[in-house]
Image (tube, helix red, strand yellow):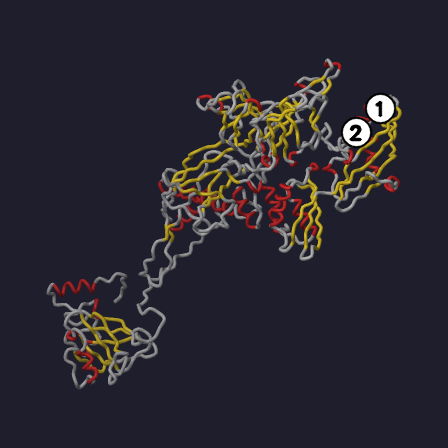
Amino acid sequence: MIYHCCDARRRERLLQAIVDGMAINGIDFLEVLDREAPTDTPPQRTLLLRFLNTAPALVLENFELDGGERITGITLEWLTRGSAPDPALAEPGLITYLGTLTAPDQLLVLRTSSSGDYTNYRLRLVDSPGALNPPPGIDRVLSEVDFSFKVECPTDFDCAPAQYCPEELAEQLVLSYLAKDYHSFRRLMLGRMTQIMPNWRERNIADLGITLVEVLAYTADRLSYAQDAVATESYLTTARRRSSIRRHARLVDYKMHDGANARVWIQLQSEVDDLVIPAGTRFLTRLTGFDPIIDEGDGARIAMNLSPLVFESLHEKTLSASENAMTFYEWSDAECCLPKGATRATLAGDHPSLAIGDVLIFEERLGPRTGRAADADPDVRHVVRLAAVQAGLTDELEGASITEIRWAEEDALPFSFCISSTLDEAAGGGLQRGVSHALGNILLADHGQTISGEVLGTVPRPHLQLLPEAGSTSCDRPEPRSVPPRYRPHLANGPVSQAAPFDEAAPSAYAAASPTTENRKPAIALQSGIAPAPENWFAQPDLLQSMPESSHFVLETEVDGAAFLRFGDDRNGRRPTAGTSFTASYRVGNGRRGNVGADAISHIMTNLSGISAVRNPLPASGGIDPESMESVRQAAPYAYRRQERAVTQEDYAQMAQRHRDVQRAAATFRWNGHGHTVFITVDRYGNRPVTAEFEEELREQLNAVRMAGYDLEIDAPRFVPLEITLFICVHPDHFRSQVRHQVLFVLSAGRNPDGSNGFFHPDRLTFGTPIYLSAIYARVMAIEGVASVEAHTFQRRGGTGTAALEDGVLTFGRLEIAQLENNPNFPERGFLQLEMEGGK
């Protein structure tokens, strides 16, 4: 045969023709008698040729046998019929074997001169020696058969013949690969057309050929741009998309953050009791001409058209009219204050609605010297979370109802609160009570507006298929492999809020309003399918740890705030099936934009009544813009150098300083009898106390990096109070009182009115920081009106030596921190005495 077909139908067609009575025949198959050959019959030399119909009367001249590589020239020695074998030719054992076969009348038995090699041989029926046509009555197609003498030899391969139809190599075109834009592609194609069609010289833009060339050049230009864009996104230094930068950085274990939304404490003035504000209630920044309550209907639509910032409450809150403003109880005294660092107070009146976990905001509402609300210091406000409440108490002396409250040490007062004061003569004099109040009805809200039920469409069905891989033969029909459709839905609004879950059991107001960046996730809920059995999908930072069956996705945010959803590939995360519909509910609002100032929030969107005012006494905080691409380009290549395990004392100190509230830390190893204990001494910002809650949070962070077998203990710093006495000579034309006031400001432990820190501010001093007398002299001499300054006392509190005064420096141990608060309520925290001479 001169051709090959994958679907051979000639045999079935010939059998049907025989059934219909046509006198036509052909070879069905050929069998080489090998292992089944009788003992008296030579193996691999007897050929059993079976026909589709009764075997024709043929002689040896009607057969041609060729083929072979090592063994060639094999000839046929004799021929006999299977139904009547010639005893003179066939062995007795062979005659017996032929009698056991079915339809022996369709069989011819041939004996070859020898067995062949492992290559293929061909037996052909011819009308006469050298003829091309078969004998009469034999089908031309089924007049020959290929076979192998070694078909029963052991082999690891399939015995089916392999048929290959090699493709002809196409002519290699000489093209310019510098063509990258529309004009160069057009010129390239026109040049090629000139080579293959020299008679076509039309260049009119209306010509169909020119139109096709320009369409192809335009398409090639777009594909070339896409190719360049992909190559650009392949490298960290050239990528232009934020999602590409994020993925490159993740390869070196650098996690690019998407920012965080702000949180704020909101106070509601309620006119009724037991008014419940549900979680998710929306609050708006101030809008001119709107009441505090904006209804959920047309009023909400009009208000939202003005694009205010939206905050939503994180928890449910029950309001009480008695908690709108609560005064402090003074126990029959006057000119009282809550000192810095206080964690307890007494409220005037019975407030049974207060409970553990409620939040109060202390606010200075009147000027201590003038009694006017306009003179109140807006910075004198502080939020606390109640750790203990006892209502229903009575002052037995006065018979007044009181309520005792206590809050966590984490929320200790950072400054003093004036409760009552004596007014200046210019303001009329007399005693002014109610200078500061405790505000109740406080709830926590965060920046972001909820968008519910946004339809993201359905996963498209595959419409492309990969080219099949080359099979063993040209007749292989591999199953088509569909290209998974690209499904990367885009949210209609952005940026998506990066929010932390609300912790109802937070030990302090500071902890509730200041979640860590690591705990923040995109505020999005994704569902696939339809009710009543939708499937939930969960957002992850990446899919590297996702299992093939995990319903995970990644929210990728671009520079303009646009958010795209990326799903898995059935290896890392599950790939959504074609035809699946998705619906998203998410929140929009993120970054520093949400850090609104105090009293910026003025409206609540609700259909409830009884709320007279809405405000945020304290500014919103915690809003962080997404990390910029340029900062990631600079930081990511060095991320792998960051130490992520603690081995030495310095390692433990550095790991502790990664905590958001730790200014400095020092670690010490001690042998405890069975192993080592690492004592970590922590200096928190603002001299905040090392509470049990803070210890637990820091220990949980360090457990991930500490060495096995090492115990952890968290200690507070060893504060060393100072005693300093300065003799200051004032210029004659300056008032001693004013100079004294300036010196106390400069050497204070607080924050000055200009925003700078005092010399003894806790954030300026840390472990082992020496105090130089010359630095104190320089600060004091910089004050206008100071003629000279001299230290008479410069020592640790309770000390008697003069070495530090003579040397001009106070030194401290490795775990010691100098302290000088100069607070008459706490003389044990250091004090500063000034002796003034001269001046007026």
Residue 102: % across, % down: 17, 74
Q: Residue furthest front?
A: 396
Identify the residue under disc 2. 744
Instruction: Tell me whether circle 1 and circle 2 mark residues in contact (CB < 8 Å).
Output: no
Residue 598: % across, % down: 61, 26
Q: CA distance from mark 1 to mark 2?
A: 12 Å
Residue 356: % across, % down: 58, 33
What residue do we see at 64% from left, 27% from top? 362
Residue type pointed to by label 2: Leu
Residue 593 in sight here: no
| Disc ID at residue 840 | none
Residue 34: % across, % down: 27, 78
Q: Residue furthest left?
A: 21
**Is 775 left, or right, of 714 in this rendering?**
right
Q: Nearer the viewer, residue 486 or 180?
A: 486
Residue type pointed to by label 1: Arg
Quarter of image, res 619:
top right
Q: Is residue 411 positioned above or below 292 on the image? A: below
Quarter of image, res 709:
bottom right
Identify the residue under disc 1. 736
First in sequence: mark 1 vs mark 2: 1
Q: Is residue 196 positioned above or below 781 on the image? A: below
Quarter of image, res 791:
top right
Residue 143 in sight here: yes
Q: Nearer the viewer, residue 183 or 264?
A: 264
Q: Secondary structure at mark 2?
A: helix
Label total for image:
2
